[in-house]
Amino acid sequence: MQARKLERAQADLEKLRSDSRRRKYRDAWEAVLRELDGAVKAAPNGPRAAEAALAAARARADLWDVTRSPVDEKAAIAAFVKVDDEHRGPAGAQALAAALGLATRAGDTSEGASIARRLADHYPADAKAFVGPIAEKEKEDEKENDDDGDDAEETAPEPEAPANPPSKSTPIVRAVKDAVAAITEPEEEPATAAKAREMRSAALASGSSLATQLGLKVRRVVVDAGHGGKDTGAIGPHKVREKDMALSIARKVASRLRSLGFNVIMTRNEDRFVSLDERTRIANDARADLFISIHCNAAKRRKLEGVETWTLNVASDRYAARLAAFENAEADRTVSDLRLILADLATKANATDARDLAQSVQSSLVRTLRSRVGKVRDHGVKQALFYVLLGTHMPSILVETGFISNPAEESRLKSTRFQEGTAEAIARGVKDFVDGRRRLALAP
């Protein structure tokens, strides 16, 4: 009973997340929340109780993303903390990580520090894993500023790109990081705790808006052409290979992004095999601000057509699981519970930006392609467990540019007109996303 209720509620939640019109209305969210709460109550101690409770808490965090109401923030954080109270272990660690990410995005420093202490107390290894990437990123940003943006692989100055969406608050994140350090470092170092209090006070005393504090510049985008080399990806009915279409479109995306002022790095620029882990490493080592992976879709039913954009999620419905299984085939391994926890810790702070980036790209794809090539089916924004997005330190999306298994769409994918329209749409979606975040950062 609980399993059926949970799966139905999760399906309704995914539909709501991908519906740009309905997701603006509170009653739609409350209806889904009632479904998820019902799944929890159906079997409070059942085998999927923790999953149901965590899903309900995350849905409340999604509602806060829409309303930005302090009441909704408190309700979501309370729900996450309750998951840890009742389901200590992997679910509890994921819940606290999500609560910490929410408090950080909301600018709630005192709440964030409290959750950080709880996370450090209950799951010290995971707490360190959460603050580690943040510390590394800050050091890299400082070094980059000292070097004045001079990269070994670049010979000319980078063109200035549009301002970046707020993704990390220096004073707030540091306050949280120091709060964790105060718990996890040896007791004979009292200066750490004093520094944490100092940083928290500075964050609270700051008179500038959170958006201004968080405003960074998006300068570097990694464009990932899916598959390659021995990994052909999907093959269409007329033998068109996904790896070839993905590379062709990715090159065009890179060219258009560069024309818009972005510095672009490609994970592959030729027909060669690059492992999924290596793609993630390239993005992280490049200190990329955004990661975009280009693919072509495939299905057993050859009539399926359309475009869709994906973000990372560790719990997906059956369709998403099937697609992820295909795109992850090269990995030839399963994801451990620990890796899922660490991935959630590393990516949760970017979840909102990733979803908004995906929505911007998806809307641009549908709008542009319909004006260029005619009817295009909009499958919306979805979530699945894609290895290539797992562990990236920046907002990351995967774009399925069309169904190569559909003969008509296979022919479309080969055409220069479709590829150029797709590339222009993706680049424009990125630019629209960044411009929107810039306006937010500059708002009084």
Image: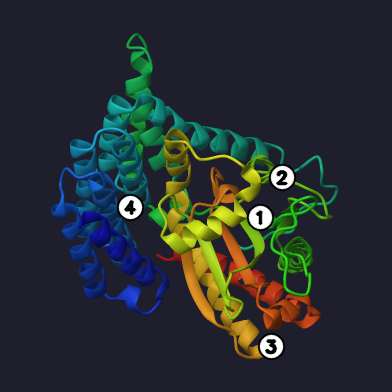
Disc 4 on helix, strand or loop? Answer: helix
Disc 1 on helix, strand or loop? Answer: loop
Residue, disc 3? 372
Disc 3 on helix, strand or loop? Answer: helix
Q: State whether residue 163 appears in this view.
A: no
Q: Amino acid at mark 1?
A: Arg
* CB within 8 Å, label 4 to label 2: no
Residue, disc 2? 149
Q: As drawn, is 352 to the left or to the right of 413? A: left
Q: Residue at x 28, y 27 (%)?
A: 122
Gap between marks 2 and 1 measured at Cα: 10 Å
Q: Point out which mark residue 106 bears.
A: 4
Mark closest to the chain's N terminus, 3 or 2? 2
Gap between marks 4 and 2 measured at Cα: 30 Å
Mark closest to the chain's N terminus, 4 or 2? 4
Q: Amino acid at mark 3?
A: Arg
* CB within 8 Å, label 2 to label 1: yes
Residue, disc 1? 219
